[in-house]
Amino acid sequence: AGKLLLDALWLGKPVYEEYQPVPNLYRTKGPARPIRYVIDPARRTIEKTVEASFEMGADFPSVRPGQVSRDYEDFWMLGISKTGQPGRKFFDQLVHANWKSGVVSHYQAPAGTFLGGEPVYAPDPDRPDQGAILCQELVPEGPSSGVLVFDAACVAEGPVARIALEHPVPPAFHGVWVPSKRGALSAEAQD
């Protein structure tokens, strides 16, 4: 009790320079390490650090709605499988990690397929502790894009559904799941 948890994605160096020039993105992107600092505010000390075992390029971590500023176990982020290799690259992994168990698993998109946008958690209306992860997909060669739907607890098993979009949509980087006025749920993307 009385502890402060500070979670960070340790990137090692500034990442914003990697966002340009288009299309030569992430040419030298290094690994990211999810790290949790357990801080004792009364003593003004870091009591301990916990690191998730992940060493690929990553960004756009997200948690379940309502867990921001609360203790949580699960988080999701996008990863780059070709981290450390020369040349341009983009996100092609959906990563699921758990602070308590230390387990990190991921879905690997097929070659030539990229993932974009912050993974969006959509809770099951009947069981809020369970839900789905929505992740944007882009296939430049098509060109085509869609939304992949994953069981949030087991993204490594791959998508349970793919919602094809009529027109290709470039990857947006932030999103949120909100209830619609009629009681159904809908996703809204922002950039």
Image: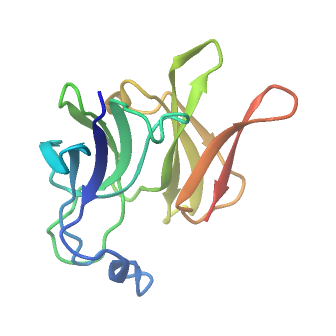
The figure's colour scheme reads rainbow
Counting labels gives: 0
Residue 15 lies, in percent from the top left, at: 31, 74
Please determine whether, in this image, residue 4 is positioned above or below residue 83: above
**Does the image show residue 180?**
yes
Please determine whether, in this image, residue 134 is positioned above or below residue 143: above
Toward the front, the furthest residue is 42
Residue at 34%, 83% (x, y): give it: 17
- For residue 143, side relative to residue 72 (left or right): right
- For residue 107, side relative to residue 148 (left or right): left
- For residue 180, side relative to residue 56 (left or right): right
Please determine whether, in this image, residue 67 is positioned above or below residue 140: above
Toward the top, the furthest residue is 126
Image quadrant in which you'd find residue 163:
top right
Residue at 19%, 64% (x, y): give it: 83
Image quadrant in which you'd find residue 22:
bottom left
In this view, the residue in front, 93 or 42, is: 42
Residue 150 lies, in percent from the top left, at: 47, 31
Residue at 20%, 30% (x, y): give it: 103
Toward the bottom, the furthest residue is 21
Residue at 61%, 46% (x, y): give it: 176
Residue 73 lies, in percent from the top left, at: 33, 29
Toward the right, the furthest residue is 182
- Look at the image and tell me in which quarter the N terminus lies: top left
**Does the image show residue 110?**
no
In this view, the residue in front, 184 or 44, is: 44
- Look at the image and tell me in which quarter the C terminus lies: bottom right
